[in-house]
Image: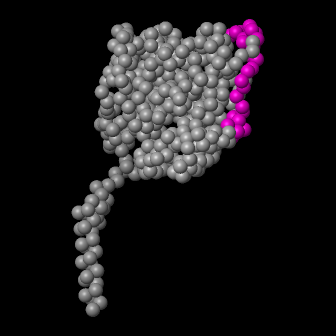
Amino acid sequence: MRFYTLICALAISAASLAQNATDGGISAETLKQLRDANSFSPADKALRNALAANSINSLSTTAYNPAVNDKHFSNKVKSSGITDQQHSGRCWLFTGLNVMRARAIAKFDLGDFQFSQSYCFFYDQLEKCNLFLQATIDNASKPMDDKLVEWLFQNPLSDGGQFTGIQDIVSKYGLVPAEVMPESFNANNTSKMAQILKSQLREWGLQLRKAAAAGEKKAALAKRKTEMLKTVYHILAVCLGEPPVEFSWTRSNSKGEPVETKTYTPKSFYQEMVGIDLKNTYIMLMNDPTREYYKLYTIDLDRHVYDGDNWTFVNLPVDDIKPFAIASIKDSTMMYFSCDVGKCYNSKTGVLSVDNYDYESLFGIKFNMDKADRIRSFDSASSHAMTLMAVDLDKDGKPTKWMVENSWGADSGYKGHVIMTDKWFNEYMFRLVVDKKYVSQKVLDVLKQKPTKLPAWDPLFAPEE
């Protein structure tokens, strides 16, 4: 009887292994093939020993990459001081303010001047909380498993963003100097504040849905929302400081000499220091090879202010974007720029180059996906915004490399900057915001189109951090 039982067990085990192989599982036979194929040579053993104590990138770094040593740029916009977003996802905010800072420095001959990031961040967070609560009210009749409702509760708040947020927040609330509302610990370290606010927003969202389901009218729901926002305002004021409604400030020149002391409101300060209509001055250009070029697109609910503008852009081939960037740099005008900064970045040299690392020699693998395939397979998307401020042109006027002013502090990368080869630019650049005066009429005409609306959860349009 026991022998019969053993035979049955072996038969079942064999059948199970065969079934696993048929169903796509790793069978014992497949595992044996994997082991047999993994024969370790002396070189492999040496590599394994090296990787036990070193990172993959340190061992795959290309020893002789010319891009690492070439720091010359034929055209460069003058900058003053490197900013530092520290442990926060506010790169979009620092980048946008750096673009305006460069304008103000040139206009008034300022020294190491900065606009207050905390001031703008306060209102960005307040407005995003309102956006979630109002959108929850507007979509309260939809079930919780509706894609839009699900997205709202998954993403009630973020400190990431893009240039539309600069337009919305600055146009509505103005600007103040950094010394009027300086950075706080929680501005530089946003994770805990964000966690608390997100949990509270989700709870409030459920309360609003329950009240709406019980038949509560919109006016009553709006009153509930206002009470919730009072708590949000208090949390932000405690963590970041309360934004001033009026302040006195002394403007000094680049030599540190005081020039003028005046009393401002944030909006009057913005008008004096920057004085342009952001929404009608700038255009966002995108390089997304998975979608049709020379078309206008907008992202649903991707805005920082509920009554503001959705993120809208013109999709162009990368080679059609470059001349506008070059024209802007030649005219000493910085630009908002975003890319997939994690790809091929050497943090020691501050260089982004597709030749930085040789994974093929290290592991025997080669990456063959093009930019469109990387986007479709979720392998690449814009992750970080920086300020484009230099280009190196060859004798034929073609770009060989670019440089951005970063917001990771003066000790990061190359003196606080990041240098990228033109080849890398082609593969991992995604967005550029440029003054319309540098753009061709053909591109401006695209703005007359009715934009194609893309869903808020499209993976290519996650907030830049």
Which residue: 46% across, 20% down?
A: 433
Residue 254 visible (yes or no): yes
Which residue: 68% across, 39% down?
A: 230
Q: Quadrant of residue 264?
A: top right
Q: Tell me the quadrant of the picture where the N terminus can be found.
A: bottom left
Q: Quadrant of residue 359?
A: top left
Residue 205 lies, with reference to residue 316, above or below; the image says below
In the image, taking residue 270 as reference, residue 359 lies left or right, namely left
In the image, taking residue 253 as reference, residue 360 lies left or right, namely left
Q: Quadrant of residue 370?
A: top left
Q: Report the front residue among 230 and 210.
A: 210
Q: From the top left corner, tell me how far across and down residue 101 is, in percent.
A: 60, 17
Q: Give the residues in magenta.
A: 233-261
Which residue: 45% across, 39% down?
A: 57
Residue 96 lies, with reference to residue 259, above or below; the image says below
In this view, which residue lies farthest toward the bottom?
Answer: 1
Q: Report the front residue among 60 and 226.
A: 226
Which residue: 50% across, 19% down?
A: 279
Q: From the top left corner, tell me how far across and down residue 65 is, in percent.
A: 42, 27
Residue 198 lies, with reference to residue 89, above or below; the image says below
- 355 part of magenta stretch: no
Residue 383 visible (yes or no): no
Q: From the top left corner, tell me how far across and down residue 63 is, in percent.
A: 43, 31
Q: From the top left corner, tell me how far across and down residue 340 is, in percent.
A: 44, 32
Q: Report the front residue among 362 and 236.
A: 236
- 243 part of magenta stretch: yes
Count of marks placed on residues: 0
In the image, taking residue 417 as reference, residue 324 lies left or right, namely left
